[in-house]
Image (cartoon, rainbow, N blue to C red):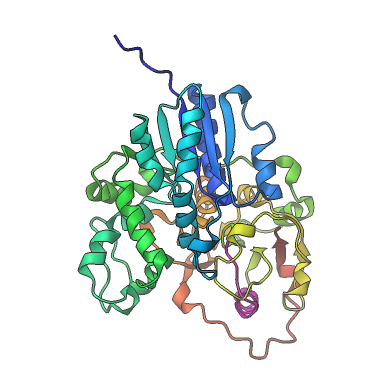
Amino acid sequence: MEETPTPHAAFLSSPGIGHQIPVLELAKHLITQHNIPVTILIVTTHTSPAESHLFHPPTTTSPNLLRIVQLPPVDVSSLLDPAAAVVTQLCVMMRAAVPSVRSALLGLRPRPTSLIVDIFGSESLPVADEFRMVKYVYITTNAWFAALTCYCHVLDKEVVGQYVDQTEMLRIPGCKPVRPEDVVDPMLDRNDQQYKEYVRLGVDYSSAHGMLLNTWEDLDLLSLNALRSIVDVPVYPIGPLTRAAEPEATNTELMEWLDQQPGESVLYVSFGSGGTLSVEQLTELAWGLEMSQQRFVWVVRPPIDGQADASFFSSGNGAVSGAADFLPNGFVGEGGDQADELVEHGLEPGQGGEGGGGGGEGALEVQVADLDLGDSAGAADEGPVAGVRVGPDKFVPSKKLGFSRINLLNRFDWMGLCRIHETW
């Protein structure tokens, strides 16, 4: 009689700290709650200080059960256009890393019994078949996003022309209809390679033995049922899994200021671990926040005149110049990045982000903290409606966020009302 192998889970994480943190949290859960040894395979482009801090200190109460394997960096420069979207870059990198994944799994002892890949690692799922491993896709955004992704190959056959040019809502079984202008970024241009990669990802997910989602039934019931009707594999809501705040990293001055504000009066603005704005967009957002007359904390990054996700691969690379160098006069800057602590202090988020770009994990932390949500990446059954909540009963959709600076150049009497939270 063949002996049952000892459970050993192997994770595959794509580049980007926003992808690595959820993988690490699920790995820690398997170790601490189920005593299952875990090996995390990380596809790297570089190692930022933030990534080094994330993986090298002791991360569990059972360090002998966790191994981190950084796979050799892959050179994809000859395979990519320099202006390729981040989704395209990640998919090409993960495709090129498949031989390294195979070699790493072959060398592990004991041999892993399961392979869990993140949303960009699906092309390594056939490797699990080679080693007779069970295979799962770990999706850290909401079930609505997963349903759209897995159904996109059907829309690809049914819809003629660009999605954004359609006059009727896009319909996904079991989900609320989607306005054409609200589709996720990879669907904006069907001629771009990232769209083709996105369609392929949705098809790949159905080849796994199951999907793990960082959500739970009561939060995401409608979308979870919709996803189950679209795919032929089991869907397992395993959340909420969030990273605990690190007290030693707390910005005391900022937290004290938050404690002095009325309840539900501070707007939290963040665009995820890789989101950036141009100089013009950043200035417009600054004035729009001022015009809202709402207290706010803004996780701001230096402007980059390029794609919105241009800073994805440089996130966590250390300090930047002061926010005063690129923000309108009158803004107050604070150092450090304490998103976890900010959420625990009861911030009301108005978070905009692309699924898979780092915004979804922050949104989940907000939901766990039982706060109101205005986020395209983590709004559960509300679908992909992006915007900003400016009061207890008022949510402004993104298409209505048009701001004007007329007659505002000398209005700096609001300085006591707002603070800037500057991130690395």
Q: Nearer the viewer, residue 265 or 60?
A: 60
Q: Outermost residue, front direction?
A: 78
* Quadrant of the image occupied by residue 318: bottom right
Residue 391 falls left or right of residue 405? left
For the stretch drawn in magenta, what is the main secondary structure?
Answer: helix
Position of residue 232 relative to residue 75, above or below, is above
User: Does residue 24 appear in the picture of this structure?
Assistant: yes
The residue at 47%/32% (across/down) is: 105
Q: Image quadrant for the N terminus?
A: top left
Residue 139, position as x, y percentages in the image:
42, 47
Q: Outermost residue, top direction?
A: 1
The residue at 65%/41% (across/down) is: 54
Position of residue 154 relative to residue 233, above or below, is below
User: Does residue 240 appear in the picture of this structure?
Assistant: no
Residue 275, position as x, y percentages in the image:
57, 64
Q: Image quadrant for the C terminus?
A: bottom right
- The stretch in magenta equals 274-292
* Quadrant of the image occupied by residue 403: bottom right
Residue 324, position as x, y percentages in the image:
78, 72
The residue at 46%/67% (across/down) is: 386
Q: Nearer the viewer, residue 139 or 387?
A: 139
Is 281 covered by the magenta stretch? yes
Position of residue 19 relative to residue 288, above or below, is above
Q: Outermost residue, left direction?
A: 158
Residue 106 falls left or right of residue 18? left
Is 225 covered by the magenta stretch? no
Residue 61, position as x, y percentages in the image:
62, 25
